């Protein structure tokens, strides 16, 4: 007797799309395993090591025997550190009971969606969007409503578009700033206009994903939850993976209304319980220490941004935005749709990304995964040498597509 997987796997899992970033990263690894010299610019992972003082704090915690279960919403020490960070850097005033520490910012978002969405509820997602927003909303039973802006608007949806998308079923609005995949950063005035529209409704919770806060080249990060009319209807998401280069530590956190924190605490308590003990102690040290190394990484990313955008603008047919944060560039490559090198025809962004991997041996991610199928996402979390060589390969490869 053998089990028929098609009858066993839940329909919602069968309908779930695999993460495109993870898929392309694995394809790059598979090709590299065959001896091909692949430059992978697909994953959203800083190429810097975690700062030494953070690792030392984790070693110290381990040596002290800090290896036991933690409270579901996080250790009190870390939650206090997060409250202090929110107040001093974001003008957000939370009590420790309003903070939930999770196994990555992604879990924070999943907790919120699972805690709030009923079947048929709508979640407005500003596009281009991070790949997991849509799938998390659908998995939680909600209907994603994507509202998008193009490269000519710097990929930033405006308040009027949001107002037009709101219905009686709208329960959530989800966005990131600085944005993955575009690197766009919403200004104070843009967020204020958005806040006024949302506050008018009175029944919409905003999920503001600010995981790239420290990789902001504008010098002015604004949290939408700091506006007076948004204090009780915003969940602010952040974490340690990007700004502190702590991707493998799996630590994210949420600050929000007490009712939401309580609901997320309940969800997390039945799914994973609390995050790792010694990593939370190290994370508290990270927040309480001067951000010297985080800012040095930001400056390195800004220099790389300038390098890669200047190189990509020399690629015929590319339309390139000028990202103000994160470590991605999101060029429009639709000029090449319909072109062929004799064996491969590029019909869309999926084909383009696949061709760059197999023909140029450069790993990127199709913009279709982010709701913009005329673009590709390129991560510049890589060395200058790899960035320069990757763009050289792309440019040389595309000369064969007519």
Image (tube, rainbow, N blue to C red):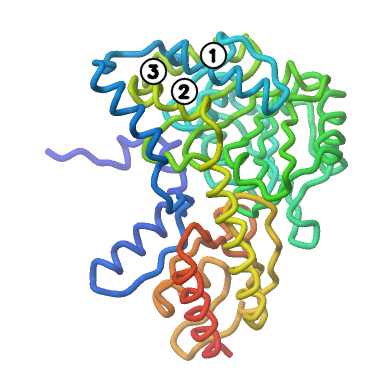
User: Could you tell which of marks 3 and 1 lies nearer the N-terminus?
Assistant: 1
Q: Closer to the camera, 31 or 122?
A: 31
Q: Closer to the camera, 244 or 162?
A: 244
Residue 80's mark? 1
Hey, which quadrant is residue 271 in on the image? top left
Q: Nearer the viewer, mark 2 or mark 3?
A: 2
Left or right, residue 172 beside residue 268: right
Left or right, residue 217 beside residue 70: right
Q: Are marks 2 and 1 in contact (CB under 8 Å)?
A: yes
Residue for badge 3: 274
User: Could you tell which of marks 2 and 3 lies nearer the N-terminus?
Assistant: 3
> Label 3's element?
loop
Residue for badge 2: 284
Q: Are marks 3 and 1 in contact (CB under 8 Å)?
A: no
Q: Position of residue 159 (x, y in %)?
A: 85, 40
> Which of the image's four quarters has the N terminus?
top left
Mark 2 surroundings: few (<14), some (14-19) or many (≥20) residues within 10 A:
many
Distance from Cα at disc 2 to Cα at disc 1: 9 Å
Hey, which quadrant is residue 146 in on the image? top right
Residue at (52%, 75%) from the top-left corner? Answer: 391
Depicted 375 relative to depicted 234: above or below:
below
> Label 2's element?
helix
């Amino acid at each position: 007797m053998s089990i028929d997987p098609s009858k066993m796997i839940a329909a919602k899992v069968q309908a779930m799309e695999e993460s495109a970033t993870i898929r392309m990263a694995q394809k790059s690894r598979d090709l590299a395993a065959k001896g091909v010299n692949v430059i992978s610019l697909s994953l959203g992972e800083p190429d810097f090591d975690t700062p030494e003082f953070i690792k030392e704090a984790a070693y110290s915690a381990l040596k002290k025997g800090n290896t036991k279960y933690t409270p579901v919403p996080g250790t009190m020490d870390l939650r206090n550190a997060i409250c202090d960070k929110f107040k001093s850097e974001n003008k957000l005033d939370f009590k420790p009971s309003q903070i939930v520490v999770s196994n990555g910012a992604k879990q924070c978002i999943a907790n919120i969606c699972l805690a709030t969405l009923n079947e048929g509820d709508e979640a407005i997602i500003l596009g281009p969007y991070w790949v997991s927003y849509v799938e998390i909303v659908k998995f939680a039973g909600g209907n994603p409503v994507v509202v998008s802006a193009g490269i000519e608007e710097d990929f930033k949806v405006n308040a009027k578009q949001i107002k037009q998308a709101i219905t009686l079923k709208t329960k959530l609005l989800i966005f990131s700033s600085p944005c993955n995949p575009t690197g766009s950063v919403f200004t104070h005035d843009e967020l204020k206009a958005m806040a006024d529209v949302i506050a008018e409704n009175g029944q919409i919770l905003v999920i503001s994903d600010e995981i790239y806060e420290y990789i902001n080249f504008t010098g002015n990060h604004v949290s939408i939850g700091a506006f007076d009319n948004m204090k009780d209807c915003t969940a602010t998401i952040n974490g340690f993976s990007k700004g502190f280069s702590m991707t493998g530590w799996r630590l994210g956190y949420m600050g929000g209304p007490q009712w939401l924190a309580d609901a997320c605490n309940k969800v997390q308590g039945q799914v994973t319980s609390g995050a790792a003990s010694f990593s939370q102690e190290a994370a508290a040290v990270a927040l309480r220490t001067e951000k010297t190394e985080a800012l040095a990484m930001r400056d390195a990313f800004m220099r790389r941004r300038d390098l890669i955008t200047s190189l990509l603008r020399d690629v015929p047919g590319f339309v390139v935005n000028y990202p103000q944060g994160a470590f991605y560039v999101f060029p429009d490559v639709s000029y090449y749709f319909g072109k062929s090198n004799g064996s491969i025809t590029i019909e869309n962004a999926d084909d383009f990304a696949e061709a760059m991997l197999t023909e140029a041996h450069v790993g990127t991610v199709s913009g279709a995964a982010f709701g913009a199928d005329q673009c590709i996402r390129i991560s510049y979390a890589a060395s200058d040498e790899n960035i320069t060589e990757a763009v050289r390969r792309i440019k040389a490869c595309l000369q064969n597509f007519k």
